[in-house]
Amino acid sequence: MISELLRVPAGPVDLAAFDTGGKPGFDGDKAAGEEALPALGAELADLQEKLFARGYTGGSGRVLLVLQGMDTSGKGGVLSHTVGLLNPSGLRLKSFKKPTKEELSHDFLWRIERELPATGEIGIFDRSHYEDVLVVKVHELADAAEVERRYDAINDFEAKLAAEGTTIIKCMLHVSREEQKQRLLARLDDPTKQWKFKPGDIDERGYWDAYQEAYEIALSRCNTEVAPWHVIPSDRKWYRNLAIGNLLLEALRGLDLDWPAPDYDVAEQRARLVNEGTP
Amino acid sequence: MISELLRVPAGPVDLAAFDTGGKPGFDGDKAAGEEALPALGAELADLQEKLFARGYTGGSGRVLLVLQGMDTSGKGGVLSHTVGLLNPSGLRLKSFKKPTKEELSHDFLWRIERELPATGEIGIFDRSHYEDVLVVKVHELADAAEVERRYDAINDFEAKLAAEGTTIIKCMLHVSREEQKQRLLARLDDPTKQWKFKPGDIDERGYWDAYQEAYEIALSRCNTEVAPWHVIPSDRKWYRNLAIGNLLLEALRGLDLDWPAPDYDVAEQRARLVNEGTP
């Protein structure tokens, strides 16, 4: 199970001990990995439709995939390559940006609650409520006591979601500082990618260690049985995309999904339709 | 141009005069059509990213694709096969259901405005504000004067969206009454599709002519230069999916999209990054 291989063990977290370049659970090379991902598509789509069908017919269950990671770690790549395998109906994707004035006037979870997947849906958070203990902590956008309060608030929130039937998968896309540098250089050198770069991205690299520490605290404080963290080695883009595809697949398989039985008499409805308009 | 072939001419509309089984603008057979659709994917994704990049860097422009059609006409198929070619980031898909009590307490456009694509996004409406002059008219869910008012209100609304830089593509997925019957039978006969069927679907067939008439009025009253209607022959699923893919592609091509020029000095930023950490 890929989820077991990538799951963050309970206790303190030392991110330096997690290899950013590994490919746990996959023996093949890049070419094999790039073939393996689309091969997940058919089963993902089948299970996604069964989940949707269950919700549509009054059953329970939903999935929430949370993507976090440093700039250039590849959240966007996961969205296009992995999430792109899913059917856009039944998908609820939200990219959280810098909060608006209105959002800041509410509790930090207010804007999150509004974007949760409905029953039968797969929700994807590109950044999330974890920004409120990451960038907020690193840049001291809230006082220390408020940040401290948020870890427990997040655990309560996620426990409530799980109790409502939400399968939560949290992924930290883990890249090395050197890999980030190479990816920023690649953006600068490619006219089709220059728009993604901001000079502030380099300023943020000055806070690298503070970010890693904030991640370590969040990954350790908010690592529960119902909402576990996974660290995804992300220096290899193909492995990152494939690993998250497999995590989604395992989560869906775990829901014991099947086509709902009809709540009407099939033969009777068939006869109505066939004899329609005849006396 | 497929948009010209499928566009509804100005004036009164007689849906019976539109072939549901045709394949205007495409000479090939089903196999060729099914190959032609994914072949659009690369250019669609490229233009979608350029649109997103333009929005991200402060430029204007967005796209709104409106899908309407009788039950089984294949809105869901278009979402999975055609919209599924797009990158889920930068896509804003909304399936409008029966309005809630809260939604009904507002003007009919209230819930629509909340789901519009942002600048740089492609919005997809699976059903739309047109339900408020279709099912509402057929089942007399509002009085006649209110329905009458709505055609002009829709034209004003769509003109405002166009003035804001929204490219609007409206598609009526046109199936024959017999094709709908066959598709409902197929749902009843397939255990993986029975969940999609409701006995009420057969009741609704009793209103077929009233629905066609309501469509004819909407397609004629709300067929403007900035928000034209297209009728998509939809008895062939592959043609329907391909035609809408081509409409999207033509609309994106019409936006003269290109990669935005950087608003920073590339060489300067490159030097900062390369010399980072050196004295």
Image (spheres, coloured by chain):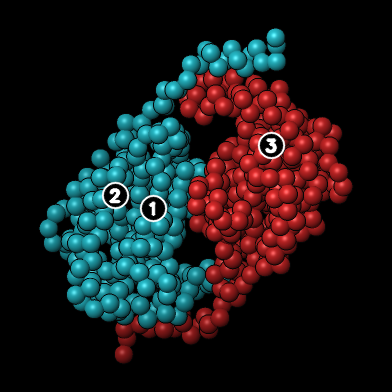
Chain colours: A red, B cyan
Residue that badge 2 annotates: B161
Q: CA distance from mark 1 to mark 3?
A: 34 Å
| Residue found at the very far top of the displayed protein | B279
Tell me the residue at 63%/28% (across/down): A204
Q: Circles 1 and 2: CB distance less than 8 Å?
A: yes
Horizontal and vertical percent position of residue A2 = 78, 46
Kindly identify which chain the residue marked by label 1 belongs to: B
Task: Say whether mark 2 and mark 1 are on the same chain.
Answer: yes
Lower position in the chain sequence, tag 1 or tag 2: 1
Of B31 and B264, nearer the camera is B264
Please report the residue visible at 19 percent of the width from the left and 75 percent of the height from the top: B145
The three-letter code of the residue at mark 1 reads Leu
Q: Is residue B239 visible?
A: no
Q: Are marks 3 and 2 on the same chain?
A: no
Which chain letter matches label 2? B
Is residue B276 placed above or below A194 in the rendered structure?
above
| Left or right position of B134 against B79 | left
Q: Is residue B132 visible?
A: yes
Q: Position of residue B70 (x, y in %)?
A: 34, 67
Q: Position of residue B262 (x, y in %)?
A: 45, 22
* Mark closer to the observer (1, 3): 3
User: In the drawing, what numbered circle is on residue B116?
Assistant: 1
**Residue B245 occupies which quadrant of the picture?**
top left
Location of residue B232 with respect to A27 vertically, above or below: below
User: On screen, B239 above or below B196?
Assistant: above
Q: Which residue is mark 3?
A: A138
Alpha-carbon distance for marks 1 and 2?
A: 9 Å
Q: Chain of mark 3?
A: A
Secondary structure of the residue carrying numbered label 3: helix
Mark 1: secondary structure? loop
Query: Which numbered disc, 3 or 2, marks the residue closer to the eye?
Result: 3
Three-letter residue code for mark 3: Val
